[in-house]
Image (cartoon, helix red, strand yellow):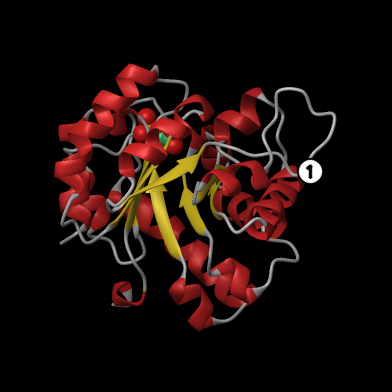
Amino acid sequence: MRKDLRQAVIAGNWKMNKTRPEAKALIEELKPIAKDKTCGVVICVPFTNLETALSLTEGTNIKVGAENCHFEKSGAYTGEISADMLAEMGVEYVILGHSERRQYFAETDETVNKRTKAALAAGLKPIVCVGELLWERECNITEEVIARQIKLDFYDISTDDLKKCIIAYEPVWAIGTGKTATAEQAQEVCKFIRDTLAKLYDKATADAVTIQYGGSMNEKNCAELLSKEDVDGGLIGGASLVAEKFGVLLEEASK
Ligand code: PEP
């Protein structure tokens, strides 16, 4: 068991939810719940809530992340936010390559790779999402899809930089659908990701990378998923919007 080599991290992905007063209320509820938990605690919030989240979590163990960033440093990219802009605010994490970004905003492995490099250059910790479509799983090409995403998303990223990244395995068919991968399926693919990293980098590096599972993980199914050897926490959508539910995940990941 090599779980001792890395920290379990539970990261909330709020997506396009919570106005400023709602964000404030949720963070105030989360603070006492998160306190004393030994797992990493991250909340990735809409850009409009970053300032609120940063000021309310100051001095606590809750870290703040954004949900995306652009790969250029600045320029004519109306509506976009650069990695430097996030870092300058004090943001620590950024989700990249989420399947909703790939599906609805035409993001590709090439742009995920560029965004990852930009985020690392700005000093952010990327949470890079990979995962297969249902059709790809049914065609029995899950491993091919995941290997391709890992190779492309981390192309030309150094060993030291890889260690600053979290990888979230998120089967697309399980996100926001209520369908969770079984703990065995999650373990199988998280281990495959680690084995792929060991081939591309080396075993010690692969063992040091936090690999999360994401996809309808909640207070009821988290214990089994998080008990798996290569599942080092979770990227949590729906259940991160309710403090008590998120608290159960934090508790479980801290065991
Ligand atoms: C996600 O958005 O990354 C996610 C896993 O969502 P949910 O937990 O709602 O499936």
Q: Vertical placement of 246 versus 22: above or below?
A: below
Residue 73 visible, this orientation: yes
Q: Residue furthest right?
A: 76
Residue 13 visible, this orientation: no
Q: Nearer the viewer, residue 60 or 30?
A: 60
Q: Quadrant of the C terminus?
A: bottom left
Amino acid carrying label 1: it is Glu
Marker count (numbered): 1
Left or right of 82 in this view: 160: left
The percent position of residue 207, horizontal first and vertical second, equals 44, 75
Left or right of 87 in this view: 38: left
Q: Quadrant of residue 237 in the image?
A: top left
> Residue shown at 77%/23% (left/top)?
78
> Residue shown at 53%/29% (left/top)?
47
The percent position of residue 19, horizontal first and vertical second, equals 39, 16
Q: Residues within 10 Å of mark 1 (few under 14, many from 20)?
A: some
Q: Nearer the viewer, residue 61 or 220?
A: 61
Q: Vertical placement of 168 versus 195: above or below?
A: above
The percent position of residue 166, horizontal first and vertical second, equals 49, 58
Q: Nearer the viewer, residue 56 or 61?
A: 56
Q: Which residue does the numbered mark 1 point to in the structure image?
A: 72
Q: Vertical placement of 96 versus 232: above or below?
A: above
- Image quarter for ligand 1 equals top left
Left or right of 52 in this view: 92: right
> Residue shown at 29%/51% (left/top)?
183
> Residue shown at 59%/43% (left/top)?
86
SS label for mark 1:
loop
| Disc 1 C-beta below 8 A from ligand 1 | no
Q: Quadrant of the N terminus?
A: bottom left
The percent position of residue 94, horizontal first and vertical second, equals 53, 45
